[in-house]
Amino acid sequence: MADEKFKITIDGIPVEVAPGTTILNAARQIGGDIVPPAMCYYSTLEGSGGKCRTCLVKVSKGSEKDPRPMPKLVASCRTTVMDGMEVQNITSPDVLDARKGVVEMLLINHPLDCPVCDQAGECKLQDLSYEHGLAETRYAFKRRTFERIDIGDKIQLHMNRCILCYRCVFVADQLTEKREHGIIHRGDHAEISTFIENALDSDFIGNVIDVCPVGALTDKTFRFKSRVWFSKPVDAHRDCPTCSGKVTLWYKGEEVLRVTGRKDEYNEVKEFICDTCRFEKKKTADWVLEEPTPVSKQSVIDANHYGIFNPPPVIKENTRLQEANEEQLARTERLK
């Protein structure tokens, strides 16, 4: 039946979802802390998920017909719900312990260069390492290192930071007409690379920057210009013949430092934008401003955020103080 719903429980909270829904998306319908983290899953990219394993959950009851628990933890982004299923996420010590191990694995080769990384403040790996990471690494071997590669005149690849989530590969494969980069080699030698280091020149290739959950793919036009918590995001749009033209402008003062796609609460771009909007339209006159971008209170970006376009001045106008200053200035001029 078209209106058939499955009743499942996640951390004791019931929810009704359509058949075929994954556990992760069912948890997102509830929201809050019970939503498993996801570094590789991206709802708009076909085939994404199942790579990073940060979304592991425990299925304590398979379904009403077969109440046996699943023997191992499962990836919530790849496991579909069954009627009567019971899932444990943050209420399961096994899940929290496994997530801690996954984060340690992701950080084995990831350099601790957050102070110089442009992704700082928007990096989900930062959040995970803060919540589940160890104070120091147990890895005693030499970390793998790569040289930085320019894969276009506006995109730089820092393979040292890559966690092989495959998001950028799916973007290039599904949004562009030709596939020019992917994963080469295997195991701990695997890396993102272009075909004999060709440049990526598609009109939509800049979206690999937005989907990257860490600082592996960076915008060369924005690098080292500002921390994100010093900038103010504003939703804007323009009449673009290539894409929807709906973007977020990141202001510092009156200057637009960068342009990104609009992201939802799970840091996923709602509508992918073209490279013309991203790299070439960085003047306020190019856009129709809408409203300040909603920012989570838990984000560091909220520290410098505002809710209206014309915030009140830091110091209110004081005519008496201005007159006193003018008198003091006049007396000082006479004494010269």
Image (tube, rainbow, N blue to C red):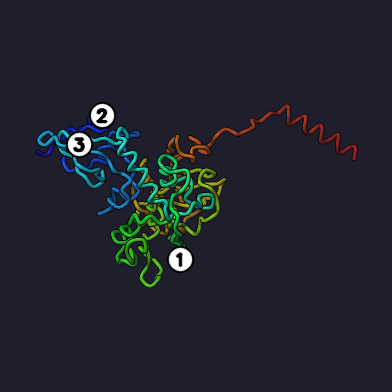
Expressed as whole percent of the image width and height from the top left, the position of residue 23 reads 24, 40
Q: Secondary structure at mark 1?
A: strand
Q: Secondary structure at mark 2?
A: strand
Is residue 50 toward the left or the right of residue 306 in the image? left
2 vs 3, front mark: 2
Q: Secondary structure at mark 3?
A: strand
Is residue 230 toward the left or the right of residue 327 in the image? left
Confirm whether residue 278 shows in the render. no
Expressed as whole percent of the image width and height from the top left, the position of residue 41 reads 30, 49
- Pick whichever, 283 or 149, lies toward us: 149
Q: Amino acid at mark 3?
A: Val
Is residue 155 toward the left or the right of residue 45 in the image? right
1 vs 3, front mark: 1
Residue drawn where x is 27% and y is 31% of the image: 11
Q: Amino acid at mark 1?
A: Ile
State how far apart marks 2 and 3 are (Cα): 13 Å
Q: Specify the label residue 149 is tagged with.
A: 1
State how far apart marks 1 and 2 are (Cα): 47 Å
Expressed as whole percent of the image width and height from the top left, the position of residue 201 reads 39, 66
Ranked by sequence position, the earlier of labels 1 and 2 is 2
Q: Which residue is mark 3?
A: 17
Q: Which residue is mark 2?
A: 13
Dot 3 alpha-carbon crowd within 10 angstroms: few under 14, some 14 to 19, many 20 or more: many
Confirm whether residue 73 shows in the render. yes
State the residue lying farthest toward the top. Answer: 320
Ranked by sequence position, the earlier of labels 1 and 3 is 3
State how far apart marks 1 and 3 are (Cα): 44 Å
Expressed as whole percent of the image width and height from the top left, the position of residue 288 reads 44, 47
